[in-house]
Image (cartoon, grey):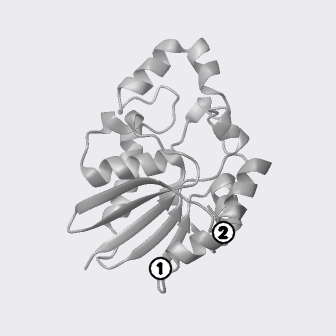
Amino acid sequence: MTTRVTLISPALSAALREARFADGPLDAAGRRQAEGIRGAVADAFADAGQLVFVSPSSRCEQTAEALGLVAEPLSELRGCAMGRWRGLRLDEVAAKEPQSVAAWLADPAAAPHGGESLDALHTRVGHWLDALPADARVLAVAEPDVVRALTVHAIGAPAEVFWRIDVLPLTATELSGRNGRWNLRGGRPLRGASE
């Protein structure tokens, strides 16, 4: 029996555009894009008995809603806790704390912001993925850092490759596997029926 997990990254928001360590609502363009592919997502990912989850953030919840998904918020899929950097832009933090940012980008165990390390994020989401039933069908709208961490875990890559994975808005990353062996299909753009 094969477990299938489809991860959809959220539509654009001001926080994503600004590289801000914050949640926030979708912007008008992001909402339009998500609503524009609603039917295609329903057609492509409709599966009886499928579990549908969402990262507990407003941008992910609003993306799920715009896509027409009824999704359960799941704390295991929350984004990385950024401690005292929360709400700030990456460029602001880099200007004030260049050594801290350098350490955070280079060492997955580092958490100079006082929040969660990338290692801790990988462990958390990896436990969730590994605990899924052998025949589960899962669809989740998840934060980009969660998608990255799940990808790293699924392919058994070292945590240092986290920063080398781009997760674009409204893309599907698909994982399938069994017995801890996962296959990856990454970054498929979600498109409307007319595209």
Q: Tag 1, which secondary structure?
A: loop
Q: Is residue 73 left or right of residue 108?
A: right
Mark yes or no: residue 71 visible: no
> In x, y percent, where is residue 77?
50, 57
> In x, y percent, where is residue 68?
67, 72
- Which residue lies most toward the front here? 194
**For residue 94, above or below residue 67:** above
**For residue 185, above or below residue 50:** above
Q: Residues within 10 Å of mark 1 (few under 14, many from 20)?
A: some
Q: Earlier in the sequence, mark 1 or mark 2?
A: 2
Residue beneath disc 1: 50
Mark 1: which amino acid?
Gln
Q: Quadrant of the N terminus?
A: bottom left
Q: CA distance from mark 1 to mark 2?
A: 17 Å
Q: Residues within 10 Å of mark 2 (few under 14, many from 20)?
A: many
Residue beneath disc 2: 38
- Would you identify the image quadrant in which residue 97 lies? top right
Residue at 64% across / 33% down in the picture? Answer: 20
> In x, y percent, where is residue 130?
30, 64
**For residue 33, above or below residue 37:** above
Q: Nearer the viewer, residue 27 or 55?
A: 27
Q: Nearer the viewer, residue 184 or 123?
A: 184
Residue at 75% across / 49% down in the picture? Answer: 29
